Image: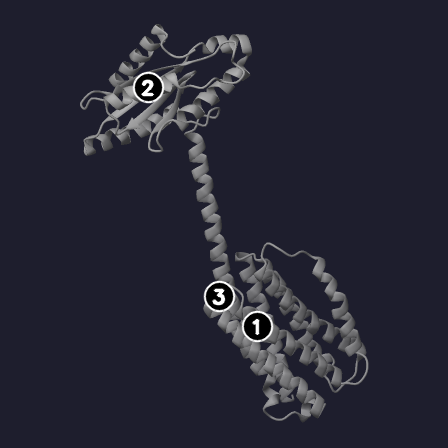
Amino acid sequence: MPVYPFSLLIQAAGTALLLILFLLVYQKIRLRALSQWILSWAFLVVGLVGFWFAPPAAYDRDAILLNHSALLAHAFFLLRGIRRLREEKGGGEADLVWLIPVFGLAWVTATGSQPEHSALVALILAAAYVTAAVSFAVTPGSTVGRLLLSVSFLLWGVEQAVVGAAFLRFRDPAGLPPTLQYAGFAAMLLEMMVAVGVILLLFEASQTRLASEMEQLRHSDLLLKEKSVRDPLTGLYNRSYFNEVIRRELVSARLAGAGLSVLLADVDRFKQINDRMGHATGDDVLKFVANYLTSCVRESDFVFRWGGDEFLVLLPGIEEADASQKAEELGHRLPNIPGTERVAPSLSVGWATHKPGDAFSATLAEADARMYEVKQRGRQRV
């Protein structure tokens, strides 16, 4: 068997093995770019096998058309895969229309003088490989993988250009110089390098995508956790979250020797609002009061919906005098709530400062008692 056809046979066998490898990798790393390269290598296998049925020195138009169509489709899907790699979220199937001129070119090269047209196909492949080399050089991803792919495709392009030029000069593969007779072996080695580079690049791309998905999961977990500690109507922290916060703040206050105060606020005449204006208006009042309280405290403070029309404000680092003043301010500065002019709700606010050694329930009871006193005296603004 002549050396050149034998080298192509070895290249075809190696290419088929690489195709199987890509299929196995695709089972684990389902990237659109890899699916395009699987198609590309499948067409390359068909094209290499086609040399056995339509060598450049022979002329079998149908076999040559199949051979040229496969090789040009190999180049098309190679470059299409690179585009998919660079634009993973973009691109559609519209660019498949380019297969029409690709197969048209194959039909033209299958007609006329041989092996000149086979040389033209080899030169087109050389241009595609050089384009791939440049594209991989500027594609984000594994540095080692990109370098390996760029060098491999550049050398593969040079090999195809030399083979194409040799076809034009010697016409018959049997007349190629001894060095060029082994072109298929060189191409096989370059394909192996390409396979390693592709796997490195795809592995890093899959790791990047996995990291992005993990970040999305963490973000979703945070949103779910945030939703679980929030009151759905007002957006304030709920009462169950208070138990977690108070344990932490009691420890912090004890270690720092700082005060810890609490305010309890109740919406006056809230039952009248619900009875006379409806529960929708009552909900609007609760949301208004929640926004009002949040806007009047520090970022380090905590505002909770305590239940019904009651709210609790936790003030870390605040002593008795400041807590009393804050309660007075909140009760007297509540703006008029739109839509409630007939009832004019107000706010009764009680306060207490936690005493070290006491149960916090006692502090809450003290604040609740003061709030009840304020409500009874009717000191809040109507």
- Badge 1 marks a residue whose secondary structure is helix
Q: Quadrant of the N terminus?
A: bottom right
Q: Quadrant of the C terminus?
A: top left
**Which one is nearer the viewer's eye here, 250 or 327?**
327
Compared to residue 176, the image places residue 48 above or below, namely above
Within-10-Å neighbours for mark 2: few <14, some 14–19, many 20+: many
Q: Let me know if residue 115 appears in the view.
A: no
Place of residue 41 in the rendered image (x, y in percent of width and height, measured from the top left): 62, 69
**Which one is nearer the viewer's eye here, 317 or 8?**
317
- Badge 3 marks a residue whose secondary structure is helix
Within-10-Å neighbours for mark 1: few <14, some 14–19, many 20+: some
Residue holding disc 2: 327
First along the sequence among labels 3 and 2 = 3
Residue at image x 31%, y 14%? 368
* C-alpha gap between disc 3 and disc 2: 64 Å
Which one is closest to the eye, mark 2 or mark 1? 2
* C-alpha gap between disc 2 and disc 1: 69 Å
Which one is closest to the eye, mark 3 or mark 2? 2
Residue at image x 52%, y 13%? 340
Q: Amino acid at mark 1?
A: Val
Residue 200 badge: 3
Compared to residue 354, the image places residue 275 above or below, namely above
Residue 134 badge: 1
Residue, far top: 376
Place of residue 277 in the rendered image (x, y in percent of width and height, measured from the top left): 55, 11
Q: Is residue 304 left or right of residue 182?
A: left
Q: Let me know if residue 72 appears in the view.
A: yes
First along the sequence among labels 3 and 1 = 1
